[in-house]
Image (tube, rainbow, N blue to C red):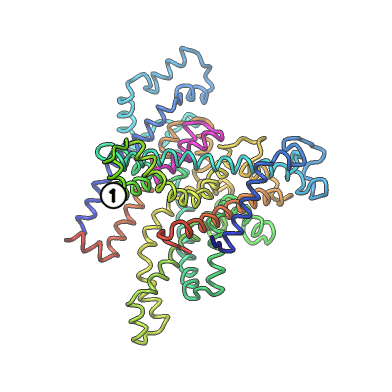
Amino acid sequence: MKLTISAYIGLTVFVMLLAVAVLAPWIAPYDPSAINLPNRLAPISIDHWLGTDHLGRDVFSRLVMASTISLGAAFVTLVLMLVIGVGLGGLAGYAGGRTEQVIMRTCDVFMTFPTVVLALFMVAILGTGLTNVIIAIAITHWAWYARITRSLVLSIRHSDYLKAAKLSGVPAWIRFRRHILPSVLVQLLVLASLDIGHVMLHVSGLSFLGLGVQSPTPEWGVMINDARQFIWSSPLLIIWPGLAILLSVLSFNLMGDALRDKLDPNLEHEG
Amino acid sequence: MLKYIVKRLLLLPPLVLAVSLVIFMFLRLSGAEPALAYLRAASIPLTDQSIALAERQLGLDKPIWDQYWHWLTHAAQLDFGTSYMTSRPVWDDILYFLPATLQLSAFALFITLALSLPMAVWAARYRDKWPDFSIRGLAFIGVSIPNFWLAFMLVLLFAVQLRWLPAMGYGGLSHMLLPGFAIAFMSLCINARLLRASMLEAQGQRYVRYARMRGISERRIERTHVLRNSLLPIITAVGMHIGELIGGALVVETIFAWPGIGRYVLNAISNNDYPVIQCFTLLLTMIFILCNLLIDIAYALLDPRIRLEANA
């Protein structure tokens, strides 16, 4: 498979990020929560590669430990979105009739909310915290996946190989799992890979607002929020976590674009 | 045309009803306890007696459909109850904070449209040359950058380093530039990409080749044949952008101490001030729906294919 240079860059950065996220406890030179007030807001040095924050915590260690939470949260959200979207969309496309009507009208209603407003509303009623933020973002996004899944299912529901499977007495659930799901999933994964950067921006945004991950736990959005009071004195503190988010989202988007070009030439290429 | 508009307007009431139902039922079924939130906000000790009293006052002892009906009919008269935090009518509070947010969102929409157009035209004119590459690169960063972080970077550059613009506060154009740009950047990049792609598509059309054969100048072809035909898809995209821009404004205005509704709603969320949250969600969704309705109508007015079909 031939890949473009940008796809290689995206893939390399992504693999590195993934390695950092998985190996975080071994990479981080310090305990990310170890407070050392005498050494607060220390500049970059051999001991502290990226300096220390307002509580004297090692910024590099926090950045590394945060990658696990930030990347993990984005992946979990995406999986949840896919499960709800594929489940309901698949059911709508497969069952048809009244079920389809109810599911699709529900989709329409969810798609009329502005995403950030709906996410804020869901966090408001579920309570703050990372789990609830993940649920909130999944609830604001599932409708798009449900709609696409339904149309994909509809496009193959009347294909000959499905009729053949039905004629030979394959039960409905097996038909769905073996003959519909695989082809639907490939296309959805392309869309999901284009979406994961967006999801990550949402998660870190809500954490930045103080609604997601709570403060002592390192997360990139939280770190930006912690550093905002020191923007005049120690501007570097706010630059690092943002760069980490930017780099991750960039690598996701580069990979998503490459994946789309390879797997799904039919999708419109925006360039 | 009138028929089309009436048809779209008839769809509005069921949609609003469904939205209000989602807002009301999600809150009640989520296990949230308005009575407890109310008592905590008012610093009243939680006893069985006080809880029972609060439940009666808030109407929580009635069947849930009665509660919904009560809330809906009062909401229709702009009575959203009183805020647990401020003890003032929710509607008055929201009306006090919302205009600043909408002002900022509108300014961000202006930036989005004003900048994405020349960017796309430039990129399409010099396709696969350096202007195209640099704009595509910029747009790629634009869709990957967190708006709240971009806001801080703009403050660092233009307020802390260069001292050209104020770092925060409410005011005229100079106060709106940094937050407006931070909010608009992602939408403007998406829009520029979309418009560029749509212009390139139009450039491949036969009528463009024919215009070229007739010896019409490239600039004129670009203006009258390419750009005009490429603008239609942008109008629909604007509907999506409005939601993102309002959402962006809610986040970014807290950074610039812009006196909008963002800070107020965040306080309401951390204090479980449910009447405020309900009103905020319903109102902003209504604004979003209405904007999209207007855009659809504008689209139909501008696109003869839809206009004629609606008349037929």
Q: Is residue B184 visible?
A: no
Q: Amino acid at mark 1?
A: Asp
Dominant secondary structure, magenta: helix
Left or right: A54 in relation to B282 = right
Q: Nearer the viewer, residue B43 or A139?
A: A139
Q: Nearer the viewer, residue B86 or A116?
A: A116
Residue A152 placement (x, y as % from top left): 35, 49
Q: Nearer the viewer, residue B128 or B308?
A: B128
Q: Is residue A141 magenta?
A: yes
Q: Residues within 10 Å of mark 1 (few under 14, many from 20)?
A: few
Q: Quadrant of the N terminus of chain B?
A: bottom left
Q: Residue at x 26, y 46 (%)?
A: B11
Q: Which residues are magenta?
A: A119-144
Q: Is residue A66 magenta?
A: no
Q: Residue at x 39, y 70 (%)?
A: B201
Q: Is residue A132 above or below residue B139?
A: above
Left or right: A230 in relation to B232 = right
Q: Nearer the viewer, residue A73 or A206?
A: A73
Q: Is residue B296 above or below residue B47?
A: below
Task: Identify the residue position indicated by label 1 in the image.
Answer: A160
Callout 1: residue from which chain? A
Q: Picture quarter containing residue B229? A: bottom left
Left or right: B127 in relation to A67 = left
Q: Quadrant of the C terminus of chain B?
A: bottom left
Q: Residue at x 57, y 59 (%)?
A: A7
Residue A27 placement (x, y as % from top left): 73, 43
Element marked by disc 1? helix
